[in-house]
Each structure stands twice: as structure tokens, then as C-alpha cells.
Amino acid sequence: MSYNIQLFRIETKEKEQRLNLENFFENDENLVPFTDQQLKELKEILLQYGYDLTMENQNGFHFNHQDEDFGMVLLTSNGLYFNTSWNRNSIFETGMVASEFTDTGEFSKYDPQNNG
């Protein structure tokens, strides 16, 4: 079992609250894409946190961390997806890293396991 945390542009959060659709995040058309500058900065920040870019394909940029408590990350044009083990340390570390991205006010963290 794994734990997932997602990061989107703040405009996606505002749109989700406005539309109030149960399956909002399952439709990519609902997600406001990152700008080229935001994508570049997100990649740089992940590298600063010790994530290694392991693959780039049609799905996006795949990152891994040597410390498995930090899990894996997929960066797409619409979202940043953290996936980690279902244990206290992993959930805490991944949650803290994801929260750091929200400090600028550009992004919003979504935690599907805790209803958003």
C-alpha cells in the first residue's frame, strides 16, 4: 500500500472548489497546467531536495530519492505527484517536502487519503 500527495497550481484548487465535482481530479482538463517557468523551478527544487531524475517520458519527469522515506515523484505538465510507503516516517517526510512547495502561494497540496 502506498501514500500519495499531489500538488497543483492554486488556480486548480480554486477551480475545484468552484465546480465542486466529485471526480474533479480524474479529468486532466480540469487541471490548470504549470507554466514553463514553474516546471523548471519544480524540477530544480526536487533536485535540491535530493531527488534524482531517473526518467523522462510521455507521462512526465520521474524522480527517485536515495532515502526511501521521501518516495518517488512524477512531475507532469499539470501536477506534481508524490508516492511513498505507508509508514509514519515516509508520510511525514513526503508531506513536509510537498508542503514546502506551497510556501510561495502558487501551489496547493492535495492529500487524497485525507479528503483533500
Image (tube, helix red, strand yellow):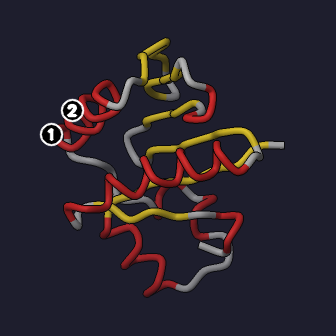
Q: Is residue 94 above or below residue 10?
A: above
Residues 27 and 94: in front is: 94
Which element is circle 1 on?
helix
| Horizontal side, residue 55 vs residue 44: left or right | right
Q: Is residue 14 above or below residue 44?
A: below
Q: Position of residue 48 (x, y in %)?
A: 28, 28
Residue at image coords 67%, 78% = 22
Q: Around disc 2, counting alpha carbons within 10 Å, would you say few (fewer than 14), some (14 to 19), or many (20 or more)? A: few
| Residue located farthest toward the front when viewing the structure as drawn | 89
* Amino acid identity at mark 1: Gln
How much space separates mark 1 and mark 2, taking CA atoms?
5 Å
Q: Tell me if label 1 and label 2 are in contact, CB under 8 Å.
A: yes
Q: Position of residue 6 (x, y in %)?
A: 52, 53
Question: Circle 1 is placed at which residue position?
Answer: 37
Residue at image coords 23%, 67% = 105
Residue at image coords 58%, 59% = 27
Question: Circle 2 is placed at which residue position?
Answer: 40
* Amino acid identity at mark 2: Lys
Which element is circle 2 on?
helix
